[in-house]
Image: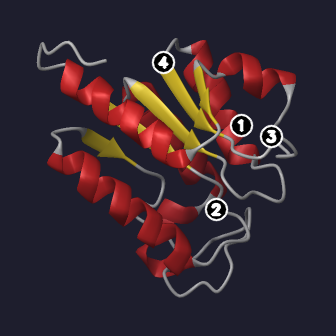
């Protein structure tokens, strides 16, 4: 199973974002999933105190165009798109784009949106998501079961 993991990046520290992707990558990689995540090729940004939404020019992998094309290519390669909108204070345009493209391409989409007042609580997000979880752990447990079910097991 190919899984794309997305989460808000703008305004977050490099350490916070990289730690998240290392954790999900290690866990789901150990289950046999092929993992896609948007930090590929962004090593030069690892010292960022706070990621910005555009304007990186120091690396060909971090230009506006490269980020858009790579992330949407990864969504296209995925079977499942997992968008984690936990603890967000502002709308993540990147996550919304990834979710919209995944929906358009008929990818299975899982969204984590715990807070009722989450800025992503919008008709487009609610309708583009195939499964919305109010708890990150429940969403991860469900994704574990999806992977396990590919082995032919009946997983409830």
Q: Nearer the viewer, residue 56 or 52?
A: 52
- Determine which of the numbered discs, if any, sits on residue 9 in the image: 2
Q: Quadrant of residue 128?
A: top right
How far apart are the two marked residues, 1 and 4, measured between alpha carbons? 14 Å
How far apart are the two marked residues, 2 and 1, measured between alpha carbons? 12 Å
Tell me the mark number nearer the camera, choosing from 2 and 3: 3
Lower position in the chain sequence, tag 2 or tag 4: 2
How far apart are the two marked residues, 2 and 3, measured between alpha carbons? 14 Å
Mark 3 nearby-residue class (10 Å; few <14, some 14–19, many ≥20): many
Q: Quadrant of residue 104?
A: top right
In the image: residue 2, left or right of residue 136: left
Tell me the mark number nearer the camera, choosing from 3 and 1: 3
Tell me the mark number nearer the camera, choosing from 3 and 4: 3
Q: Nearer the viewer, residue 51 or 153?
A: 153
Quadrant (top left, top right, bottom left, bottom right) of the N terminus: top left
Check if mark 2's residue and mark 1's residue have beta carbons within 8 Å. Answer: no
Q: Disc 4 designates what residue?
A: 107
- Determine which of the numbered discs, if any, sits on residue 7 in the image: none
Rendered residue at 80%/22% (across/down):
124
Check if mark 2's residue and mark 4's residue have beta carbons within 8 Å. Answer: no
Rendered residue at 68%/41% (across/down):
113
Check if mark 3's residue and mark 1's residue have beta carbons within 8 Å. Answer: yes
Check if mark 2's residue and mark 3's residue have beta carbons within 8 Å. Answer: no
- Percent position (x, y) of residue 52? 73, 70
Q: Disc 3 designates what residue?
A: 120
């Amino acid at each position: 199973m190919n899984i794309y993991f997305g989460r808000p990046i703008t305004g977050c520290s490099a350490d916070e974002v990289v730690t998240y992707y290392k954790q999900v990558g290690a866990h789901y990689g150990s289950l046999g999933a092929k993992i896609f995540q948007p930090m590929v090729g962004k090593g030069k940004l690892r010292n960022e105190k706070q990621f910005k939404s555009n304007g990186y020019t120091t690396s060909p992998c971090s230009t506006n165009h490269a980020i858009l094309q790579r992330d949407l290519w990864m969504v296209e390669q995925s079977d499942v798109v997992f968008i984690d909108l936990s603890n967000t204070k502002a709308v993540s345009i990147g996550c919304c784009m990834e979710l919209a493209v995944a929906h358009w391409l008929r990818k299975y989409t899982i969204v984590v949106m715990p807070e009722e007042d989450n800025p992503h609580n919008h008709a487009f997000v609610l309708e583009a998501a195939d499964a919305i979880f109010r708890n990150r752990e429940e969403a991860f447990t469900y994704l574990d079961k999806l992977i396990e079910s590919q082995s032919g097991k009946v997983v409830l």
